[in-house]
């Protein structure tokens, strides 16, 4: 069957190189991607067949984390690096627990921002949720603009989400300082939900395939970087970790929601290479 032509790209979209947000969308079965992203994704699957399952496991963790925070009474969320909308968006999960929940999405990929805005408008909830184009690396820009939407009340607890995004900050960049700045702006009782890729403690028998995927992403517009479990733990300094603390994504509260993909890694949760945690600000 002939592939339909790609739609015209929104202004500012780089189609010279594949982009992580659009590749991730393809892994999850979405349509907000272009031929260059699909070609990259297909090569990634050939190199590492479990990569689609790993992507779904990360998405399921996001859902369980948001549901947990909402059940603790958090009713406003700031999702930075939100990506392209797909099944189980933050505002959908949060409002399933509390119909009054609100969310601000932030991403630096124009396709993700455009699709998020279309989704909110189509659902008729654009007056209660918002989407911004912004760079996670610049909290001095992102934070005030998020508040300017009127969606978030900075005096009440906020669920700050950085799932599947911090590994795109280079090792030569001040990732820890960036996260700490956001955390310093959160009021007491807020939560921080995050995940990261690591090669710390993952199976060694697929090391060559992981190295190949890593090198492949270095050629994209959004290369990723591994961090150790200890380095990831530093992001949560000063926070009260929710049990089980820092864990593999498929091991974090599997009883709290959908774990279809995570269950496929139950025999060896480390296979995902994804670690995660949720912390509460005292």
Image (tube, grey):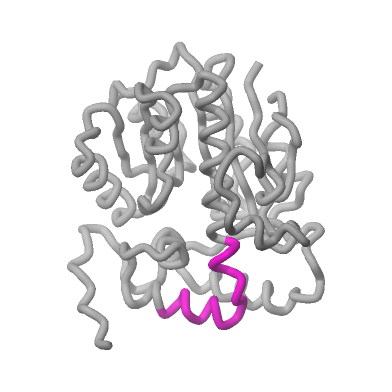
> Residue most toward the top?
155
- Residue sitting farthest toward the bottom: 1
Q: Position of residue 129 (x, y in %)?
A: 30, 31
Residue 32 in the image, given as x and y percentages of width and height: 31, 62
Q: Where 191 sits versus 90, above or below? A: above
Q: Is residue 52 magenta?
A: yes
Marks counted in the figure total 0
Pick the quarter of the image with the N terminus: bottom left
- On the picture, is 134 further left or further right than 178? left
Could you tell me which residue is drawn at 54 percent across and 70 percent down? 217
**What residue lies at 47% left-to-right and 14% top-to-bottom?**
156
The residue under the point 38% across, 31% down is 103
- Closer to the camera, 162 or 48? 48
Q: Name which residue lies at 74% across and 75% down.
A: 206
- What range is drawn magenta here? 39-54
Q: Where the C terminus falls, by quadrant?
A: top right
In this image, 21 relative to 178: left or right? Answer: left
Q: Main secondary structure of the magenta part?
A: helix
Q: Is residue 238 magenta?
A: no
Q: Nearer the viewer, residue 248 or 137?
A: 248
Work out whether 154 lies above or below 39: above
* Residue 27 in the figure: left or right of residue 261: left
Residue 104 placement (x, y as % from top left): 36, 33
Asked where in the image residue 279 lies, by quadrant, the reply is top right
């Amino acid at each position: 069957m002939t592939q339909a032509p790609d739609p015209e790209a929104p202004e500012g979209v780089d189609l010279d190189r594949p982009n992580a947000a659009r590749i991730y969308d393809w892994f999850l079965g979405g349509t907000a991607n272009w031929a260059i992203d699909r070609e990259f994704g297909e090569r990634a699957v050939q190199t590492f067949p479990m990569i689609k399952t790993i992507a779904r496991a990360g998405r399921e963790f996001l859902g369980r984390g948001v549901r947990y925070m909402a059940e603790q009474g958090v009713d406003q969320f700031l999702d930075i690096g939100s990506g392209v909308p797909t099944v189980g968006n933050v505002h959908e999960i949060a409002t399933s627990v509390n119909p009054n929940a609100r969310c601000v999405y932030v991403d630096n990929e124009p396709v993700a921002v455009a699709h998020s805005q279309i989704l909110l408008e189509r659902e008729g909830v654009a007056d209660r949720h918002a989407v911004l184009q912004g760079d996670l690396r610049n909290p001095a820009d992102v934070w005030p603009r998020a508040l300017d939407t009127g969606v978030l009340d900075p005096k009440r607890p906020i669920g700050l989400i950085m799932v599947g995004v911090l590994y795109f900050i280079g090792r030569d960049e001040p990732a820890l300082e960036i996260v700490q700045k956001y955390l310093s702006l959160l009021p007491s009782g807020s939560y921080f939900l995050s995940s990261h890729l690591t090669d710390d403690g993952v199976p060694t028998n697929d090391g060559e395939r992981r190295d190949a995927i890593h090198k492949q992403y270095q050629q994209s517009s959004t290369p990723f970087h591994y961090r150790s479990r200890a380095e990831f733990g530093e992001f949560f300094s000063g926070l009260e970790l929710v049990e089980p603390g820092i864990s593999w994504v498929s091991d974090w509260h599997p009883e709290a929601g959908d774990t279809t993909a995570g269950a496929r890694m139950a025999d060896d949760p480390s296979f995902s290479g994804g670690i995660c945690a949720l912390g509460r600000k005292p």
